[in-house]
Amino acid sequence: MNLSEKQQEIYSRQLIMKDIGIEGQKKLVEASALVVGCGGLGAPVLYYLTAMGIGHLGLCDGDTVALSNLNRQVLFTMEDIGKQKAEVASKRLKALSPDLKTTVYNENMYEESAEEIIPVYDIVVDCLDNFETRFILNDACIKAKKPLVHAGISEYYGQLMTIRPGKSACLRCIFPKGVTQRRQGDGSNPCKVRATDGESVFSVPVIGPTPGVLGAMQAMEVTKYLLGQQVCSDGIVTYNGLDMSLEKVIIKPNPNCICANIL
């Protein structure tokens, strides 16, 4: 394929980078990425991947836009309250890049859907807010041998790692006993809110820029992987927004992990 004159102008700042150029930009235009979760992390990931020229994006989210989302989910406005997040996000992204191909999944990710959807894409991005679904995503990516860019956030803090099946540790290596939601008073300080069905649920506290920082980092990882560059797969990076520091903890694959048996 050849880049059009319009594409060459849009991506001109990337084309003059020695690590990208025309050939690198072609790789991005021909690439596909599945973003699971279109909220705090997903919104900046989707925006930057679109702006950089990724040709095909899958948007997976079964949730609708709520008023409490607007402090951090930058693809949405007041007019979007009650609408499907993935649908609204797709329209916003196509306004930015009409040539973008999107596939919208207005559903949460389950085992069967994960195994069906994930093999279609070159890379998967974890923009979720719960570990139950993250483990489903983790296992399906390992089975399909697809890289998974993980990030998680809370308050001023975040973490990031790119999982490469057969080459790096996975989420189960890091959390072999799983992760359970903590309750207020035990140090994690989640905020108790009232759901529309009357049940009490717990929401992770977060200031708006935190998912913006981690989402941008995830988009960077996706881009580097698609360009054949080194990604953060040898450990997990932690971000501290209070003192503006990054720290990497090296993590080796656990030979007894379930991921060793899935491959």
Image: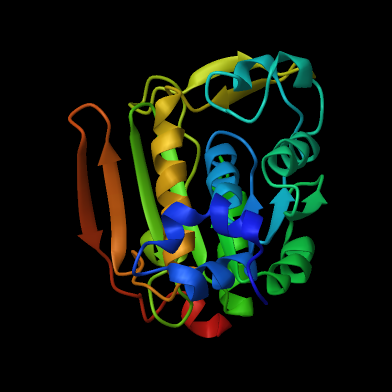
Position of residue 31 measured from the top left corner of the image (x, y, whole percent): 62, 69
257, 56: nearer the viewer: 56
Which quadrant of the view contains residue 225? bottom left
Position of residue 205 measured from the top left corner of the image (x, y, whole percent): 45, 23
67, 136: nearer the viewer: 67
- Examine the rendering and report whether any part of residue 171 can be seen: no
Tell me if residue 49 comes above or below residue 29 in the rendering: above
Position of residue 27 measured from the top left corner of the image (x, y, whole percent): 56, 73
Tell me if residue 157 comes above or below residue 260 in the rendering: above
Residue appearing at x 55%, y 85% in the figure: 263
- Residue 53 lies left or right of residue 65; in this view the side is left
157, 245: nearer the viewer: 245
Residue appearing at x 53%, y 18% in the figure: 71
- Residue 189 lies left or right of residue 84; in this view the side is left
- Examine the rendering and report whether any part of residue 139 can be seen: yes
Residue appearing at x 44%, y 21% in the figure: 184
